[in-house]
Amino acid sequence: MASAAVAISPSAPFPDAVQIVPFDAPLGAEVFGLDLSRPVDTATFARIKQAHLDHHVLVFRDARITPAQQVDFSRRFGPLQIHVLRNFQLAGHPEVLIVSNIKEDGKPIGLGDAGAYWHSDLSYKEKPSLGSLLHAQELPGEGGDTLFANQHLAWDTLPQELRSAVHGRLAEHSYLAKYEELRARNPYRPALTQAQIDEVVPVQQPVVRTHPETGRRALFVSEHFTTRIVGLPQDESDALLAELFALSTRESLVYRHQWQPHDLVFWDNRSVMHLAAGTPDHERRLLYRTTIEGDAPF
C-alpha cells in the first residue's frame, strides 16, 4: 500500500517557518516547523486548516504537547465530541479518548480494538465528526500502523452504474452494528448501559455526502457502522454495500501511516475512512484521541 515517501527532513532549511510537504500517496501531508506547544497564530492556523482540506490527513512529527494543549488545538476547529465509552476518558480531560491495548491490574486503560474495521469516526451521530486528532504516547516495536482511504477519490473513480445505484440514497449508520461481535473477540470491551444505547440510536446519512467546506463529493458508508441502504431489500442492500466497501478501500486510495514517537495525526472524517492495522498482544500501544464535531451530512 502507498506510504509516505518524503525526501526531506525536519532539520532541512526552509524559507518559511512552516512547510507542508505532500506525501507520495493518494492523500496526506507532513507539517514541518510548527511547535504545537505554543499558540498558533491566525495566519499559520489558516494555512493548517487549508492544508487539512487539501490533503485530508496531516502528520505533525515529534509533537511534544500535553493533553491540554491537544484539546486546545483541536477545539480551534470546532466543538469537541465526547465518546460514548466514558470509562476510557483521560482523567481530567473528558474530551480525550484513550486508545490503548495496555492493561493495568487486569483491566484495560483504553479502547484496545478501536479502528478494527474501516470507518469514519462518529458517522452514527446526527452530526458526525469533522476530524480526529490522534497523538502517540507509547508505540509498539512492531505493528500499530493506521491506514487512511481517500473517499473523494473513491467517489471519483466509482463505476457509473454504481454512481447511478447510490445517487440520492440514504444509508443507516449504527454504533451497535458490530459491537457485540467486537465484544466476543475482546471481552474487555464493556457492555453498554441502556443510557449509552439511547445515546447512539441509529441515524440515516447520505451514501454520497458533499464536503461542507470544499463542495467535493465523497462516499460515506463503512463496513463498521453502515447497516443498510434505505429503501432496498436487505439482500440487495448487502450486495451493494459489499461492492462499495471493497471499492472504497482499494490499495490505490490508501495511505499507510507508520507511527513515529510523538506523532500527532489529524484527519478529515468527512473525506477519509481509516483502519487500525493491529498490534501484537505482547506489544504496548497508547494514543490520545480528540474528536471535533462536524455538520449534519448533506
Image (cartoon, grey):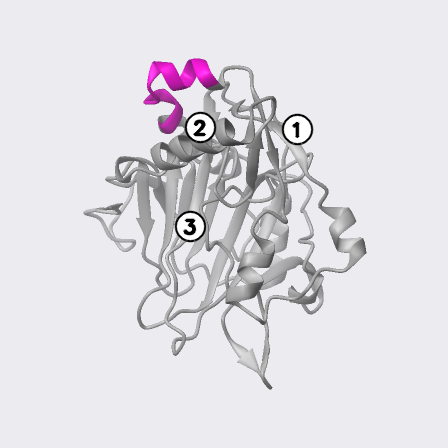
- Residue 232 percent coordinates (x, y): 56, 23
- Dot 2 and dot 3 residues touching (CB under 8 Å): no
User: Could you tell me which residue is drawn at 43 percent across and 36 percent down?
Assistant: 56
Residue annotated with mark 3: 275
Q: Tell whether position 84 is magenta.
A: no
164, 54: nearer the viewer? 164
* Residue type, numbered disc 3: Leu
Label 2, label 1: how far apart the Cα atoms are: 24 Å
User: Could you tell me which residue is drawn at 30 percent across and 69 percent down?
Assistant: 142
The answer to which of marks 2 and 3 sits earlier in the sequence is 2
Tally of numbered discs:
3
User: Could you tell me which residue is drawn at 51 percent across and 29 percent down?
Assistant: 237
In which quadrant will I find the C terminus? top right
In the image, is 182 to the left or to the right of 283?
right
Residue annotated with mark 1: 296
271, 204: nearer the viewer? 204
* Residue type, numbered disc 2: Leu
Q: Which residues are magenta?
A: 154-165
The answer to which of marks 2 and 1 sits earlier in the sequence is 2
| SS state under label 1 | loop
Outermost residue toward the right? 195
* Residue type, numbered disc 1: Ala
107 in relation to 45, above or below: below
Number of the front mark, 2 or 1? 2
Residue 236 visible (yes or no):
yes
Number of the front mark, 2 or 3? 2
Label 3 crowd bin: few (<14), some (14–19), many (20+), radius 10 Å: many
Residue annotated with mark 2: 240
| SS state under label 3 | strand
